[in-house]
Amino acid sequence: MPIVYVARRLLMAVPTLLGVVVFIFVLLRVVPGDPIAMMIPGEATPQDIANLRAVYGLDRSIGEQFVIYIGNLLRGDFGESISVKQNVLSLVLDRLPATFELAFVAMVMAIVIGLSFGIIAVYWRRRWPEYAVDAANAIALSLPEFIWGLILILALSVMWPLFPISGRIDPVQAADFKTQFYLFESLLTGRLSLLREVLEYMFLPAVSLALPLAAVIARVLKTSLMEGIGQDYVLLARVKGLSPLRVLLRHVLPNALVSTITITGLHFTFLVGGTVLVELIFSYPGIGNMLYGAAINRDLPLLQGVTIIFAVIFILLNLLIDISYTLVNPRVRLA
Amino acid sequence: MNVLDIQNLHVAFTQRGRVTPVLRGIDLSIEPGRICGLVGESGGGKTMVGKAITGILPEDARVTAGRILFKGQNLVDLADKERRQLLGRSIAMILQQPTTALNPVLRIETQIVEVLQRQMGLAHQAARARALDLLNTVQIRAPERVLRQYPHELSGGMCQRVVIAIAFSCQPALIVADEPTTALDVTVQFEILRLLKILQRDFGTAVLFITHDLGVVANLCDRVSVIFGGRIIEEGQTADIFTAPKHPYTSALMAASPRHDQPEKGLHPVPAQIVGQLWREIEDYDRARSS
Amino acid sequence: MSELRTSLWHSIRINPQLWIGGAAFAAIVAIAALAPWLAGHDPMEQDLLSQHLPPFWLPENNPSFPLGTDSLGRDILSRLIWGTRPVLLVMVLGATLSGMLGVVVGLLSGHFGGWLDDAIGRLIEVFMSFPPMLLAIVLVAVTGPGLDAVVMAIVLIGWTRFARVIRGEVLVLREQDFITAARVLGYGHRRILFRELMPNIAPIALALFALEMGRAIVVEAVLAFIGFSASDVPTWGGIIADGRSYVYQAWWVMTLPVICIMISVLALSMFADGLRKAIDPMMQR
């Protein structure tokens, strides 16, 4: 009954979402005292301040403000940005593809690297590939994304100039795109030189995001595979005369994936959260940089919109991970 | 010629440089189409014999001496690739725990079909049809449905029937059955044993039947070997062993087995002095070999 | 005396991580304390005639600036030395406050259970619905930049880690005989919480604390990197930000503080590992 399960999980996410919304309201309106003071840059007359107060409904009581705030959110109205004078939701949706593509590429990298390293370490266990993978894991896990990003800049752009370190594409070429999905658009329209360039810009930020997750996946997968190797069904598969590679990939791996996804699920959200940081290091024009701009300009509605949308994405992502457990595990699927 | 000839087989564990022997010179042979019982208590090494034959010894265990001749071919120094040609096709295995012997995330169909494809070179459709036949042969009702199911949806007895179907799928010359009924209910045990006997006779397969249960051996096996501490201490025709056991351990083991026909007799554990004497002999043996 | 020396030597040999990590931590404290005497220059002093001077091992260096200068001609070595002060402040204060908050919340949640535990669980879930850096940036945007804002941000994103782990530990401890015995004896909540539970979770809290210090350094560096930390004192993140803009002209400006952060983070995670190793035998009840 997967649909019932999904519905139940969706329902369980509602109180969390409510908590998120309340928390942001408290953080942005109650804590700092006067949000108008922090929005207005310098020489504003008291009359200006009063006008702005009325525009943003800040002259009302906190209770009233909260009701209006919730009402607006329910209608999907995130207000208008102060610094850019545009609808917050459309601003965020305009930037979302950039962050989405970055996170997507990083996830694919992390999964591909993590899975292959884990499998290599177990297939050639007790030999040098296993020790090499163990060492690489330990190094990757010892430092956070921020430091990896900076090290990658120094190594692959300064010392050895291979990749660009700022932005998403050469601004001249940005006009070539009709959508904000640069990667998918260039891929689908078959413009390979453009695709290559998009990937070059994305490479360093994606690697610094992918490294920690890849190491976690490789380590957890390796442990689960090692546990799987001694199982009865693996012995039986070997007695069937299957090749060691087929035994590993067809019989041990699917079972190991179940526990690997369960254990590493949380780390996928860490990766998505890490985009904020990595975008800042690489001046990558996604949501993280938009958040930074909103923070610098003290653009309250934009700050609020970005935060809520990011939280919604996080909650949905957690939901997706939960559902994916049931997809890979037939025992849960049919229960 | 015998299907299986095990000669002076030694297997030892090596952990952190320390060598611990588990099999100490096993001799055992099976004629084609016969059932040979290998009987002993847990820890006696009987499972290791099965694993040595099928080449699935634990990673820290190794054959240190002796030969395992399958139709005259020594399995011990066979390359992995050549061994895999024989496994599944000529030598198959049935494990003790049917519920864990099947892969929990693969459908029954996949688990039967893959061996037919690999060892018989069948195309998928042909393999699937053969799989259906096999499920009929092991007396599974609604085989079409079972093919699409996962192991956790089947009972233990059903799982064991599937494992048996896999074992017989390529009509092997030898099946190693390691306690195939121990984990099952008594009523199911009986059905599985009868099924095993029928299939074995129909296909003319030789079976190495590993068990701790002498009662099962009496009904099923042509010959019996009794194992203790990795050594065969008595071997012979089933009838001879049961009427006139030569070794005191064998008689004690018989007294210790529950008798289905005489439940009121109760259980008698193997006397400590017999076990102690056997261990002393094994220690002497190890000392003689290491010096 | 010699007995003390051998036992110390033994301890270093069986648990080098603890001592290397501890020594690195002590070094940061010492450098921060002695900054005015160690630094050759005023870290804020600009010298626009000597911008981007290279460090001593490169040609055209100036011996008066051993590690070179940044884009405003400020001495990098002095800035790195003075930079240990905000680092020390932020990591000790941030880790202590988030540790205290998280431990108290985790203890209460695990010990009392019921609706309180549910409510705290929900609250933690809400906090986990944000990327940590996002929360930190939003908070600093609201309060304005500065070291106090950085510390608040660290606490805001750090307390849940303590609370989750401690809560789990308390749930395990609750089932053990000595807690049941304390309950049967009719001890009050305060006694059970502080005399029975606290000593048992202290080792884990300590190891988490060491890890949190490492994280605090990184959070501070990130916030300084985007100009949200203190602007009136030099910070490692600030040097990185300056170096990032001119990385092709003067790679060393960014490299040096990155190395400082790497060493500190690695040392603190070694320290945490060493602590855990030292505590482990005690944990075997």
Image: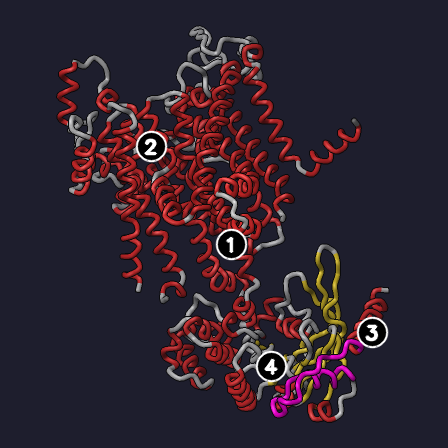
- Residue at the image position 44 percent from the left and 8 percent from the top: C46
Residue A307 picture location, percent across and down: 29, 36
Q: Are marks 2 and 3 in contact (CB under 8 Å)?
A: no
Mark 3 vs mark 4: tell me if same chain.
yes
Q: Chain of mark 1?
A: A
Residue A127 picture location, percent across and down: 62, 52
Per the rendered image, the range of residues in magenta is B248-273
- Residue at mark 4: B174
Q: Is residue A160 visible?
A: no
Taking A98 as reference, is A257 above or below it? below
Residue nearest the observer in this picture, C123 or C118 = C118
Separation of marks 3 and 4 at Cα, in angstroms: 32 Å
Q: Chain of mark 4?
A: B
Q: Are marks 1 and 4 in contact (CB under 8 Å)?
A: no
Separation of marks 3 and 1 at Cα, in angstroms: 46 Å
Separation of marks 2 and 4 at Cα, in angstroms: 65 Å
